Image (spheres, rainbow, N blue to C red):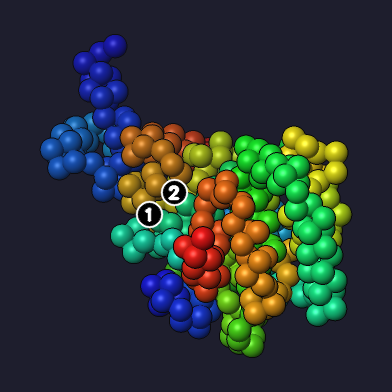
Amino acid sequence: MLAFCAGDLSAFEGLFQRWASRLLRYLGRMICDHAIAEELVQEVFLRVYRARDRYKPEARFSTWIYRIATNLALNELRRPHHRDPHFSLDEGDGFPLAAEGSPVDEVVHARRRSEAAVRELEGLPERQRAALWLVAAEGLAYADVAVALDVSEKAVKALVHRARSTVAAKLQEGE
Amino acid sequence: MSESEAACATVADDLSALLDGELAEEREVAVRGHLESCRDCTARVAALRRVDPALAAAPAPEVPADLRARLDARLSSETRPLRESAAGRRRQADSAAGRRRQADSAAGRRRRARWFTHPAMGFAAAAALALYVGVRAVQPPVGPVGPIGVDETESRIAGTLHESMTPSSQPESRALDPLAPSPGSASGSITGSEWAPVAEVDLDDVSDEELAMALEFDTIEDLEVIANLDLLERLLEIEEAG
């Protein structure tokens, strides 16, 4: 990002390559509509491009970009036309929960657990959804999530715990 | 509530933070101490621990092959100015000069002052100034995201205008002639259709007289809109010359 701010435009390509997939995954979970998620990913990068003069290196880039993405997601979710969240697991290869060579039923079970977790996540209130995803899937610290969501760390702790407890209860029902 | 239930209640809200490594050291020690003697809370932690891998295992969507191209197209449309023909610019400039000569009366000056000093006009005036004088693209398109070579100030002005432009009722041509009084708007309000985007105007085509007239925009509140340093220097020179 610093190279891009200094005028190295090829660095923008690097930012895109590194962040497009993660943002698409995050925004897909938040919006539950991949077409809109793709539009929002573009919007994130547009804002990154426009704001390059204002980026301060004291702020971690991941925190900054997730803040932009979260704001866009929350704004989108507030639009009247937004549909209710629905299950929208992508088609994909691989079932990383099961080791290679595991019995087929374990692989199937792992996939079902993942699907159930995502389904439950997408039914959570938006801030719980964002907080849990950013911690669980993106590995952000509570302090960074607080910045991304514009809430206190104490609030993040509560959001994460409530969200995780809800998803955990659902997974236990299915066991 | 029994003593053990009360103990469980005191750690319940900390279980997720324990998994995330977000507890202060002293608190972590206390929670772990409770877990050593409480099977229920240990089971709760085990259940919580299954969530993150399940979520992280969800397949990541593929980035569509054309997403970058779509982004580039949007970046291009943001930074590219709409260019006028040279003949069109001259017509606008001549028309504006003629109107200013006719309006060069005390009444005309008062009307302009009212228009420019109306509170609603401060930013619109600054924006109109940016529209009127514009900036010139100085580099050919380069780079993976379209006309990156466009003067950065142009994109900043376009961005500023895009984000905060006040809608205008004036015809598109008026966008290049902000000094003409607005008919039927003695109060100075501007409403209605959109301003024309930044036009490409060579600074050499803008006379000192026109820049001096621009200085009547005494309600410019944000000189950052005049992002072109060359223009700013010229304006300051004219002002100092009195």
Asked whether, in this view, residue B50 is left or right of residue B158, the answer is left
The residue under label 2 is which amino acid type?
Ala
Nearer the N terminus, badge 2 or badge 1? 1
- Chain designation of label 1: A
Please report contact status of discs 2 and 1: CB closer than 8 Å, yes or no.
yes
Q: Distance between the residues labelled 2 and 1?
A: 10 Å
- Chain designation of label 2: A
Judge by depth and name the residue closer to the eye, A66 or A162: A66
Judge by depth and name the residue closer to the eye, B162 or A38: B162
Asked whether, in this view, residue B201 is left or right of residue A112, the answer is right
Q: Residues within 10 Å of mark 1 (few under 14, many from 20)?
A: many
Q: Look at the numbered disc 1 and give the secondary structure of its residue.
A: loop
In the picture of the structure, the residue carrying the numbered disc 2 is A148
Residue drawn at 80 percent across, 73 percent down? B89
The residue under label 1 is which amino acid type?
Leu
Vertical placement of residue B179 versus B28, above or below: below
